Image (cartoon, grey):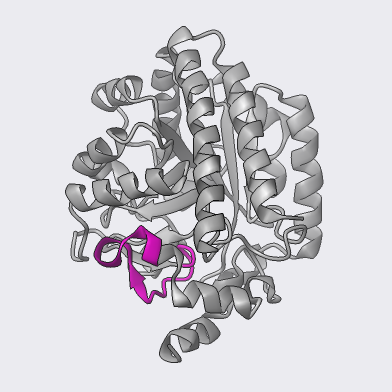
Amino acid sequence: MDIGVYMAESIRNIMAKAYLNVLGNPHEARFVARMQCTITKAERRRKAYREKEGVEVPPFLIASIATTCNLQCKGCYARKNGIAGDTPDKETLSPEQWSTIFHEAVELGISFCLLAGGEPLTRRDLLESAAAVEDIIFPVFTNGTMIGAVYTEFFRKHLNMVPVISLEGELAATDERRGKGVFQRALLSMEMLHKEKLFFGTSITVTTENYREVTSEAFLRHLAELGCRLVFYVEYVPFDETTEHLAFRDEHVAAMEQIVEQRREQFNEMIFLSFPGDEKALDGCMAAGRGFFHIGPDGSAEPCPFSPFSDTNAARDGLRAAIASPLFHKIRTARALGWEHTGGCTLYEHSDEVEAMIIDN
């Protein structure tokens, strides 16, 4: 399957469903209709760049804009990889530098930029810079504990900023990993967003222990009643041997795919996205620029958030250079994205091989 065609078609389907979900809100409906046209133009820009430069521009970026977080979730990849901590001790790009990257992304035809951290809501200045780039949709991955009246107004004013609140399941599972009271605070944030008729979603890390619960009709019905219209399922990546039992095997991936397809038919009002998702049909993961790549807080262009290796800096070298990264090229040429692995990230499990590619540059 041609990945460019697949990604373009997937984006069109997402936007079409998003439009149906906001028809009851004229303000949101006008925004989605405008973005459908903008995304079509972006697709043409990516095609033109591919034909002119011979480089495939991914439609997605992931940007870790914050280096601090107000929670200490168990198994947090951002803390494990050194992206985030309790204090801002890691170099972070300025709002102006991020703005330059985002505007360059528009010129290249990138349509979506997922904002992560740390906790991105700790960086209001950077969110303001992103919000001003109206031709990109920015899903903001947040733990939901900092959404109050001020941020609700921010999201109402900037519809291209889409809050995506992280959960682990119901109360017991969420509070066990994220801390006591986090689940109820996240639900309160959802209620506030729903009251304002804003489009928002949730992100759920799926493991061998919780995937049945978080894909159950009862759980999804609860989310739908709260107004949630977007569900990201992200496969758990084990960071140590004690949690390897939580990582998906082939049988879990197959079961998850089947369940999600059923839920898409049952819950027409919701959009379901699964990562890594259809990597087998696409001959491997979509990281390293095939479908997306990651920009760290200091501008480092990395294959994905779980593989923090870089030979190019998007702020220093520009986004075009980041897309053409020699490391990304080596990963794709070595067909590393199709290497055997356990859990949700091929490259994390083969960190030594990826790091060796940088040394060989």
Image coordinates for residue 79, horizontal then vertical, percent: 36, 64
Q: Nearer the viewer, residue 111 or 209?
A: 111
Q: Is the residue 327 above or below the residue 114 in the image? A: below
Q: Is residue 307 magenta?
A: yes
Q: Is residue 347 left or right of residue 342?
A: left
Q: Is residue 301 left or right of residue 216?
A: left
Residues shaded magenta: 303-321
Q: Nearer the viewer, residue 126 or 233?
A: 126
Q: Is residue 128 left or right of residue 26?
A: left
Image coordinates for residue 350, horizontal then vertical, percent: 57, 80
Of the 4 image quadrants, the one containing the C terminus is bottom left
Residue occupying image coordinates x 44% and y 46%: 114
Residue occupying image coordinates x 62% and y 62%: 344
Q: Nearer the viewer, residue 75 or 9?
A: 9
For the question of whether residue 119 can be seen, the reply is no
Residue at the outermost front position: 52
Residue occupying image coordinates x 59% and y 37%: 231
Residue occupying image coordinates x 75% and y 49%: 256
Q: Is the residue 30 above or below the residue 234 in the image? A: above
**Residue 320, located in which quarter of the rendered image?**
bottom left
Image coordinates for residue 85, horizontal then vertical, percent: 28, 61
How many numbered circles does the render carry?
A: 0
Q: Is residue 311 magenta?
A: yes
Image coordinates for residue 107, horizontal then vertical, percent: 39, 45
Residue at the outermost bottom position: 360
For the question of whether residue 120 can be seen, the reply is yes
Of the 4 image quadrants, the one containing the N terminus is bottom right
Q: Is residue 18 left or right of residue 67?
A: right
